[in-house]
Image (cartoon, grey):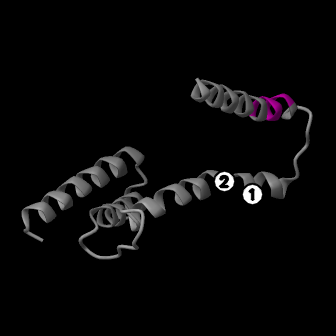
Amino acid sequence: MNEVYVIGGMALVTFAIRYTMFALSGRLQFSEPFIKALRYVPPAVLTAIVVPAVVIPTGSDLQLSYTNARLIAALIACAVSWFSQNLLLTIVVGMMAFLGWQWLLLTGLV
């Protein structure tokens, strides 16, 4: 029963924070540098989430070797993204690279 209270409390806090910003968005004037800075928030948050999962896949040790399939797939996905500028192609190639490299590692071919 405590979990229900915790989840309900988190939902209320999340809704209050977001609703407050939406309710005030038409009434507040933000400066141009602040608006420019807000554009960097999504890439910064995504990087903070993805990079630890790629370079620390076990959660304890930094793995920067070719045996880290996530790292190899991330590097390939970065290259595909850089040259193609296509999100869907980047995701598909990144997943295929991850699965392929992991298969090569498991079969001992790499």
Contact between labelled residues 2 and 1, with CB atoms less than 8 Å apart: yes
Which quadrant is the N terminus positioned in? top right
Residue 33 % position (x, y): 82, 58
Image coords of residue 19 (percent x, y):
78, 29
What amino acid type is highlighted by mark number 1? Answer: Ala
Check disc 1 and report its element: helix, strand or loop.
helix
In the displayed structure, does residue 103 sit left or right of residue 11?
left
Q: Residues within 10 Å of mark 2 (few under 14, many from 20)?
A: few
Q: CA distance from mark 1 to mark 2?
A: 7 Å
Residue 8 against residue 98 in the figure, above or below? above
Q: Nearer the viewer, mark 1 or mark 2?
A: 2
Examine the image and state in which quarter residue 82 appears: bottom left
Quadrant holding the C terminus: bottom left
* Residue pointed to by mark 2: 41
Residue 65 in picture, x, y percent from top left: 29, 76
- From the viewer's perspective, is residue 35 above or below residue 14? below
Disc 2 element: helix
The residue identified by callout 1 is 37
User: Which stretch is magenta?
Assistant: 18-23
The residue at the point 43 percent across, 54 percent down is: 85
